[in-house]
Amino acid sequence: MTLQEALQTGTPLAGELVIDSHCHMGPWYNFHVPEDGSPEAMVHSMDLLGIDVAIVSPHVCIGPDYHRGNREVAAAAAQFPGRIVPYITVNPNAGAAEIQTEIDYWDSQGPICAFKIHPGTHQYKASGENYFPVYEYAQAHGLPILVHSWAGDRLGGPSVLAGLAEKYPEAKYITAHSATSWQMVDEAAAETKAHDNLYFDVAGSILLYGCLEEMVERLGVDKILFGTDNPFIDPRPGLGRLLMARISDDDKRQILGLNAKRIFGL
């Protein structure tokens, strides 16, 4: 059975490695999130589709309380070991010293897998110095950083991330929502092609027709990561758009999970 046939028959992707590298958790103040985005609800939706792993930054982290969110996702990871993997998320407005303390705490609890930053909701440019503790830790340990981004974004857009990728060549920067407009595709593709440590993810409510095919042609398949924004967005449309793309099953498998396994060290 091909991956497209699995989709068309409603068959979960059993036996395939599927890593959703862009997830949240919990409610969001102006958006309907079924069952308040509980870890149980998220894992249930993952099981229906055959998603093995969700890498998670709770909504409260990118909103008012990153300390609380980091602890909530750590608890969820303990409840569902191997299924939920935490991002360590920081709010740069807390200041570099407090962020360093948070990083030191999670470092003491075990290896940090990855970081998430959201320059948009925190209204702080990704190149600002309060993020430097994150970048320095990621540089020292070769870790990925998922960065919320959008077309024309002057806080966390591709041109900003390109400068960081040059300054911290061992860190890995993932430009989120890279398939949400052709402007975004063009901006992100140019920078991603020029930097070995820049990557795409395809999370979002929009995935342009023909976009995945264009991304693979421009960059090769090794730079593209599957993400859904679950539970902020139902994961089924994002998975369906990938499985229906006019690329090979081997390419789909790279995007579904093999790239994330390599980049996140899972």
Image (cartoon, rainbow, N blue to C red):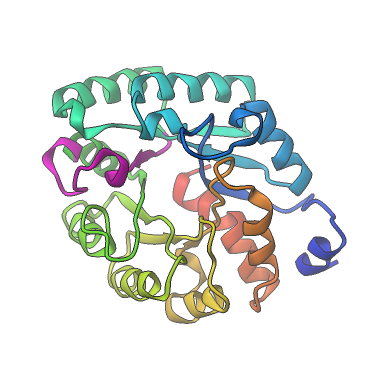
What number of labels is visible?
Answer: 0
> The N terminus appears in which quarter of the rendering?
bottom right
Rendered location of residue 16, percent (x, y) = 72, 53
Q: Which residue occupies the extreme left position in the image?
A: 129
In this picture, is 172 found above or below 244?
above
Residue at 35%, 18% in the rendered image: 108
Is residue 134 found left or right of 111 in the rendered image? left
Q: Based on the displayed image, in which of its 4 quarters is residue 46 positioned?
A: top right
Q: Quadrant of residue 162?
A: bottom left
Residue 115 part of the magenta segment: yes
> Where residue 155 sits in the image (x, y, percent)?
22, 53
Q: Is residue 7 above or below residue 37?
A: below
Q: Residue furthest front?
A: 30
Q: Residue at x 51, y 55 (%)?
A: 203
Residue 168 higher or lower than 231, as above or below:
below
Please provide the residue range marked out in magenta.
Answer: 113-131
* 19 lies left or right of 43: left
Residue drawn at 25 percent across, 37 percent down:
134
Q: 121 or 53, which is in the foreground?
A: 121
Q: Is residue 257 magenta?
A: no
* Place of residue 93 in the rendered image (x, y in percent of width and height, measured from the top left): 19, 31
Q: Is residue 130 left or right of residue 26?
A: left
Q: 150 and 257: which one is in front? A: 150
